[in-house]
Image (spheres, rainbow, N blue to C red):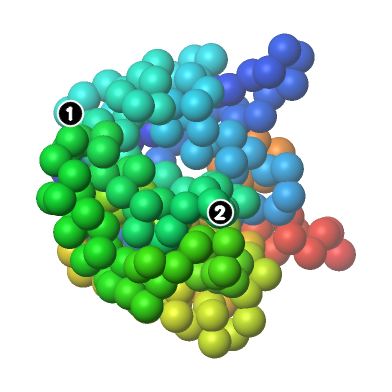
């Protein structure tokens, strides 16, 4: 049974087609990479799934519920957490307060939300920042802070948009370890990523977009040997 099912999703902005008839699925507890060159339509697909830009045509299902057309808040309440390409950190607030913002979507009990937020900061290896301003954190730390805030909505599916971009090898390794811990909690992960050495070794499957169309969908090994994928990244011979 699929946790997430994307059925023939097309998204148009005026005369521009950002996604065209894209279909794929994610099973429970799976890590799936969504890759492709710049402008391939990856973030648009995230926006469709998370309620920021409803599909023009096609359907999106979470478990047995059709969620295409849901608002971002509705998507979060049914179990979709999401991070953004640029870490949307409340820099004037502490790390703890940042994570609590996510927790208040489902729970208004301040002490319960606070305790859960502290545990989530420890989970993403940021326990030392509990009472420190988010502005004092590195980009890598702010990205993991955004992951903790997304986990505060208790998702069954976490969408991560380029959490490894611009990180050094040590930071990539630390982020990968966090992703694997999330997977081990039974949470499925859909990850947009350009750092292929970060996503390829840990993904159950890879979906490749190019010019808005799906050109490959399979195991990391199959996808990395696919001539169409190689051409999309490196150009034709």
Please, what secondary structure does the residue beneath circle 1 have? loop
Q: Residues within 10 Å of mark 1 (few under 14, many from 20)?
A: few
User: Dividing the picture into quarters, in which one does residue 115 lie?
Assistant: bottom left
Front-lying residue, 40 or 119:
119
**Percent coordinates x, y for residue 24 in the rendering:** 40, 41
Q: Write down the quadrant of residue 168 in the picture.
A: bottom right
**Mark 1, mark 2: which one is toward the viewer?**
2
In this rendering, the answer to whether 224 lies above or below 7 is below
Q: Earlier in the sequence, mark 1 or mark 2?
A: 1
Distance between mark 1 and mark 2 Cα atoms:
38 Å
The residue located at (60%, 51%) in the rendering is 85
- Seen from the viewer's position, the closer of residues 93 and 2 is 93
Q: Position of residue 212 (x, y in %)?
A: 65, 36
Residue farthest to the bottom? 170
Q: Is residue 47 visible?
A: yes
Q: Which residue is mark 1?
A: 64
Which residue is at 30% across, 24% downward? 74
Quarter of the figure that contains the N terminus: top left
Residue at the (86%, 64%) spot, across then down = 237
Q: Is residue 223 left or right of residue 74?
A: right
Residue 91: which disc?
2
- In the picture, residue 40 is in which quadrant? top right
Q: Is residue 187 at all visible to an observer of this figure? A: no
**Image height of 158 relative to 199, above or below:** above
């Amino acid at each position: 049974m699929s946790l997430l099912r994307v059925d023939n999703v097309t998204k148009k902005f005026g005369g521009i087609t950002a996604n065209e008839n894209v279909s794929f699925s994610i099973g429970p507890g799976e890590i799936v990479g969504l890759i492709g060159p710049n402008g391939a339509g990856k973030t648009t697909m995230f926006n469709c799934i998370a309620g920021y830009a409803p599909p023009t045509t096609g359907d999106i299902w979470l478990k047995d519920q059709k969620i295409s057309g849901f608002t971002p808040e509705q998507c979060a309440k049914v179990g979709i957490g999401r991070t953004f390409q640029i870490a949307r950190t409340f820099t004037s607030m502490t790390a703890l307060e940042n994570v609590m913002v996510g927790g208040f979507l489902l729970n208004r009990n301040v002490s319960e939300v606070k305790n859960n937020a502290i545990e989530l900061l420890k989970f993403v290896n940021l326990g030392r920042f509990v009472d420190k301003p988010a502005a004092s954190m590195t980009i890598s730390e702010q990205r993991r802070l955004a992951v903790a805030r997304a986990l505060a909505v208790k998702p069954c599916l976490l969408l991560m948009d380029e959490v490894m971009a611009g990180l050094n090898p040590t930071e990539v390794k630390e982020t990968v370890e966090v992703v694997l811990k999330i997977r081990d909690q039974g949470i499925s992960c859909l990850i947009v990523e350009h750092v292929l050495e970060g996503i390829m070794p840990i993904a159950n499957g890879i979906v490749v977009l190019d010019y808005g169309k799906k050109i490959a969908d399979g195991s990391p090994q199959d996808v990395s040997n696919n001539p169409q994928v190689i051409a999309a990244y490196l150009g034709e011979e």
